[in-house]
Image (spheres, grey):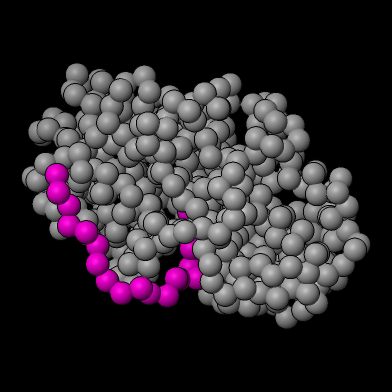
Amino acid sequence: MRRNRLTGVLGTVALVAALAACSTDDSIDDTGAEGGESAAAEGGAEEAESDGSEFFSQADMDEQDEQRSATFEGDEATPWLQYIDGPMTDTSEFATDQPMKTCFANASISNPWRQTGWITMNQQLEQLQEEGVISEMETRDAEDNDDTQIADIDYFISEGNCDVFIISPNSTAAITPAVERACETGKPVIVFDRGVQTDCATTFIHPIGGYAWGIDTAEFLVDNLEEGDKVVALRILPGVDVLETRWGAAEQIFEENGIEAVDYFTGADPAEIKKILTDELTQGEVQGVWMDAGDGAVAAIEAFEDQGMDYPVMTGEDEMSFLRKWEETGLTGLAPVYSNFQWRTPLLAVQKIAAGEEIPTEWVLPQTPITEEERGDYLEANDGMPDGHYAKFGGEDLPGYPDVWQERIIP
């Protein structure tokens, strides 16, 4: 189907960034939003009512659309070091030949996406410790709680012996003042994974963003469906910025191209996902399934199998459970990503800061979906990894590969 292309002026990239996805792998604890969002869905599955208008910016959507085809600086073989050309931060004042103590305030490791990244980050740490770049990384886990993370950041500030701060915010607005207090120490501050409402950090590291996810997935569905076809959109929960922008972009594209889309909040519950799709299938045909995160993708496919219906055109995520089910069924699919390899980048930023090198003020990393043509390569490369593992984790050259990821060794 021919789609209407997005148009618009280049906008300012929003500092508010987040991410979300989960796993249906029962061997991994918890199924919170991928970035560790503390918000929780209530009341199980329900037809979505939030319009997400407070999160939507056409200028930001247009910019992320442009960034999808941008030229990234750096070596494609090390995407965790690539970035889109833009303002750079001078870090020469922090240059040192002594190992730096890193203090990391982490939102959580409460789901498989964050666990995969946390493993990768610790293997990168091991390498940089051996090279004498980092002396230690003192980490405090907020367990998805804003108040805990604020206290964690204030603890690091009062402790007074951090050479550099790394912060993966639990939420955007609530953590902003604490990040500003860290900046006031005069030490370098690295924010990654989600953003905050201040530009005081030395660098803000993130993949392109939620709009890019929404554009990639909706355009794929439009290209493989016909005008008037029905898509069921499965959304984890309302009020999370990156989830709202994923859906905001997708909804606009569906409307522009005559796709009938109905969206539901699922609470990331596989049973509720099955119930939603079973109910929809008893009312008529469903040609497509769109997800704002990969959690429950296998359950969604199984709903069609249980009803003896043809597989839908579907978008999931680069979690291994979806890639394997996609391969097994032969359905028409796409695996969007919110690049898990970003967990390496903050520590590599510390290495550059210690060397006094310039680093991107906003470090925008590549975010490229896995297509059917690439799926087999990623399945082969990740053979032996658990279902909750993410294909684009980017740790193949790090110490402990592949054992620590296969055995899910969580530090």
The C terminus appears in which quarter of the rendering? top right
Q: Which residues are magenta?
A: 1-19
Residue 284 visible, this angle: yes
Residue at the image position 56 percent from the left and 68 percent from the top: 362
Residue 393 in percent (x, y) is at 58, 40
Residue 195 point in image, percent of width and height: 54, 66
* Above/below status of 79 relative to 198: above
Residue 43 in view in this figure = no
The reply, left or right, for residue 289 in relation to residue 205 is left
- Quadrant containing the N terminus in the rendered view: top left
Residue 171 in the image: above or below residue 108: below
- Is the residue 323 above or below the residue 238 in the image? above
Q: Is residue 23 magenta?
A: no
In this view, the residue in front, 121 or 31, is 121
Against 130, residue 243 (above or below) is below
**Residue at the spot x=17%, y=35% of the render?**
287
From the viewer's side, name the closer residue of 385 and 132. Answer: 132
What secondary structure prevails in the magenta region?
loop
